[in-house]
Image (cartoon, rainbow, N blue to C red):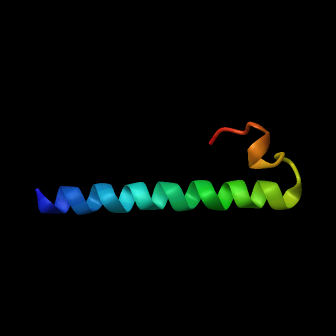
Amino acid sequence: MTVLRTVRKLRRRLVRIVCCASCAALLARGIVPAPHEGVRT
């Protein structure tokens, strides 16, 4: 059970990192407007 818990934690963290990285890359390219303009992740 502990293994499942850690796997879920790692997966959640990995997903968050990937989302942040992709959003940052898009922002750097200027494809996505600023987050405060109503962009949902």
Task: Give percent across and percent down for residue 40.
Answer: 66, 38
Name the spot of residue 35 as percent of width and height, x first: 74, 47
> Left or right of 37: which side holds 41?
left
Q: Which residue is drawn at 21% across and 57% down?
A: 5
Number of numbered discs visible in the structure rendering: 0
5 versus 31 height, above or below: below
Instruction: Identify the residue at horizontal 70%, vertical 54% (top origin).
Output: 23
The quarter of the picture where residue 4 lies is bottom left
Q: Where is residue 33 in the image (x, y as percent from the top left)?
A: 84, 45
Left or right: where 27 falls relative to 2: right
Q: Is residue 31 above or below residue 5?
A: above
Residue found farthest to the right: 30
Q: In which quarter of the image is the N terminus?
A: bottom left
- Figure quadrant of the C terminus: top right
Residue 36: horizontal and vertical position, in percent?
A: 75, 45
| 29 relative position to 2: left or right | right
- What residue lies at 43% left-to-right and 61% top-to-bottom? 13
The residue most toward the left is 1
At x 72% / y 39%, what residue is drawn? 39
